[in-house]
Amino acid sequence: MNPENYLYLATILFVIGAVGVLVRRNAIVVFMCIELMLNASNLAFVSFARLNGNIDGQVVAFFVMVVAAAEVVIGLAIIVTIFRTRRSASVDDPNLLKL
Amino acid sequence: MSAATAVRWSEGGSQVISEASGMFGLTWLLIALPLFGAIVLLVGGRRTNSFGPVLATLLVGFSFVLGLVLFFQMLGQPGEERAFNQSLFEWAPIGDFSVDVGFQLDPLSMAFVLLVTFVGGLVHIYSLGYMADDPDKRRFFAYLNLFVASMLLLVLASSYVLVYVGWEGVGLVSYLLIGFWNAKPAYATAAKKAFVMNRVGDIGMSLAIMLMVTTFGTTAFSGVFAGAPEASSGALLALGLLLLLAATGKSAQLPLQAWLGDAMAGPTPVSALIHAATMVTAGVYLIVRSNPIYNLSDGAQLAVVLVGVLTLLFGAFVGTAKDDIKKALAASTMSQIGYMILAAGLGPAGYAFAIVHLLTHGFFKAGLFLGAGSVMHGMDDEVDMRRYGALRKAMPITFITFGAGYLAIIGIPPFSGFFSKDKIIEAALADNIWVGIAAILGAGITAFYMSRVMFLTFFGQKRWADETHPHESPRSMTVPMILLAIGSVVLGAVLVIGGRFVSWLEPVVGPEEEHDFAIPVLAITAIIVAVSLVGVALAYVMYLRRPVLVEAPTGSVLTRAARQDFFQDAFNESLFMRPGQYLTRFLVFFDNRVIDGFVNGSAAAIGGGSARLRRWQTGFVRSYALSMLAGAVLVVGVLVLVRL
Amino acid sequence: MIELLSAAPPTSTGEALAFWVLAPVAVVAAVMILVSRKAVHSALWMATTMIVLAVLFIMQGGIFLGVVQVVVYTGAVMMLFLFVLMLVGVDASDSFVETLRAQRVAAILLALGVGGMLIAAISRATFPDAPGVGAANDAAGGHVEAIAEAIFTRYVFTFEAVSVVLITAAVGAMALTHRERLTPRKLQAELSVERMRSEHPTPYPSPGVYAQHNAVDTPALLPDGTASDASVPDELRRQGTVRHTELEGIGESDADEGDQR
């Protein structure tokens, strides 16, 4: 098997995550899809590390995970706050960006 | 008169002008007093309602007293040292060119100061009675004060620019006062008409000032007159014609005379002060003041004479046809100023007599107008002379004062008009026989139409309705009339006999020229008086012997044309107003369709475009995420394509 | 495992087998995240994907990352997701009716565009021989040592920055969710006084009293047979997850009991 297959898999997962961000309205599910995209990119990083024979790709993936964790913490806190005031977790409801 | 000074005269009436000192340092106060009154009344508003009119009258009175004091001071000076210059401050310094606010008090302006403050003061007093019941009395007196200030500024200014300031000031006040009762659209229109026609003349004035700046580099009298002999004849002719245009506008001379009749819409004291005695004579002042320019340009003088002769005949003819007493008097004003302009156009021979006639006319015409106002006051504001008649018993004082003015204007000796008009006609005859004959003819017509006014108003059968009760006016009105009547009687003799005024004015305009006649001067005087008497007799036959119809008869073609001011308005309308209206209509159309179309169209395009662009901003996070993905597609696509 | 760690190109048969088994699982689980109506189901499918990815990491020599993936992602992050889901309402299922015009079509087309171009780029790229990370590990004296050396030497500033991000996120989450108490806390004495003055001095009916179920989300039935919303916690009412019985009276309830769950 060719190790490039890992990259194809990462691409497919990334695309699925992107579609999920665009079509789902539940903010938590949208968040999960974002995590999926991050994970797909992590897979690509790890694959590149293996293809190039050094450890740096894995380190970058590690940092991505840490940042993703921080992001999840803040993102979920925001979702909870919005839910408290608006009684909804839909990303379409707070369309306050439009006047 | 020494030979040395005589040489200076030949150069155009130059005089020794000294710096104002002592009492003459108070020249500025002449203007400041009424100006102060105007400001107090206009700014003070309703609070000054109680004392405002009296304050205004007092301030003009103070101005007159001050003028009188200065006059006697001036009398104490030797003849050629009677001119004083007072420079207040530098108004507009522009490089080498600078305009100073300064006053020049010399015999010519002194005469005007006395005329303006005296007649102005009397009209103020008269107005206290005439306007007693008007709710806007305060505004009226504020304007009157402003007028006196502007007029004094006009005659006291030492440069043409400052004359222009006063010139515009009196024009403004004239506009405000003609339209004083502006609730009536016709009056407001009359005010606008006067203003617009004055503007036409003012353009001549402003062009003349610009020409002076380029020709002489200054607008001060001293500089312009000193430089006039060196200027080219073309420039002098242009200056003379432009100043004449300004004079025709302000003094209601042909071809800018049409506004004066309509200006009678204003209150009668205004007609007396502004549109008879003072403001309309500003044109005469301007020409006489500019005598060094006119003396050097025969063409300009000829134009002045032509304007004068034509207007004096025109006004006289119009005067015969008017039934409105004020309009008849307005036509007469036009005609009398025609005499003055004619005299001013005759050069050194006529300047002094133009001013003499101006002064006497100021008195008797103001008296006539005040008398007319008194008649209207007693007749419930009726102005149609055909509805008067036999008023001499009901209004004896008005009758006598009006009668004095009447005798003065038709030139019956020894009333004042006789002296002044007689001298003008003599000078005209000496200049050109036809001009003289026209002036004599004008005198005859004057006698005719003034007798008509007199007979229709005070003699004959009573033609007013029974419910009108003519009564004599209050004392505040009759006293000024009496004073003016006295002036009408004696002023001419005082000024002319012994050449008093001629020598008084000599330092400004030069000595009177002696003229020779084929026949004795006395015979000429007799002819003039005889022609006037013929006019009186004709009026007697037509309006006293025959019954007067209350409704005006159709009359001949000439009468009807004269009633319409010889179709001057129709002429102006068809030649200037209608094309102007079409032009403005076209411009409005152009503006609405093309310019607005462009502006609105671009605005609508931007608005529509933004409305469409706005759809992109749905406010939905997912839409924005979609556009981000589209951007990612673009970026990846570009990268892939570049690497291919 | 040791062979896997130092897997040399091309991949071994065992790795290929594992990949071809796990990759479809990952893709199917990812798709299921998308199409699940209930957020909880999505979360579970998400966990599946994560674990599969952890195995794939390990297969490629990233043992440390794989363990971190399981511990941090599946263990902590996904639990956090589930907590929030509970808070927001587990039962609410999403509507799949698309409200934005052409959003779904455009999203799929654009995603296919991105995917297509990425795949095209990958297929055109030439890669090295995939030496594996074994050599790097050996140089540092072990896999974890190799990662530690990279993190604490070459990437130390990144590491510090990331730690700052993490601590900031923790403080931020607290600041966002913290609610200041605006009124003094009521003591028991005040509460009882308040209750006696209210219209309802007696205790509210407990959930499930007189009803067929004693679950917290089932309202009590009042003597006249109507449901009393007052018996259900406010939070459930707000979430709209109150389970209303369709029965008027107790007598009829027995017949339908089997259908209730």
Image (cartoon, coloured by chain):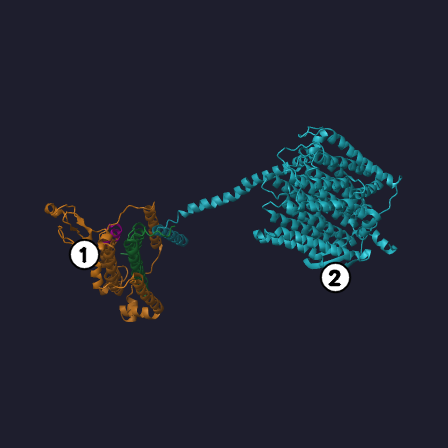
Mark 1 lies on residue: C201
- Nearer the observer, disc 2 or disc 1? 2
B588 vs C253, left or right, is right
Q: Is residue C136 above or below residue B152?
A: below
B502 vs B610, left or right, is right
Please state the horizontal and vertical placement of residue B616, each as a whole percent of the image.
39, 48
Q: Are marks 2 and 1 in contact (CB under 8 Å)?
A: no
Q: Is residue C36 magenta?
A: yes
Q: Is residue A67 above or below residue B513?
A: below
Q: Quadrant of residue B518?
A: top right
Q: Label 1 amino acid?
A: Pro
Residue B98 in sight here: no
- Chain in cyan colour: B
Please state the horizontal and vertical placement of residue B184, each as a whole percent of the image.
59, 40
- Chain in green colour: A
Compute the Cα span from label 2 to label 1. 106 Å
Q: Which residues are magenta?
A: C30-40
The quadrant of the rendering that contains the N terminus of chain B is bottom right
Mark 2 lies on residue: B22
Drawing shade for chain C? orange
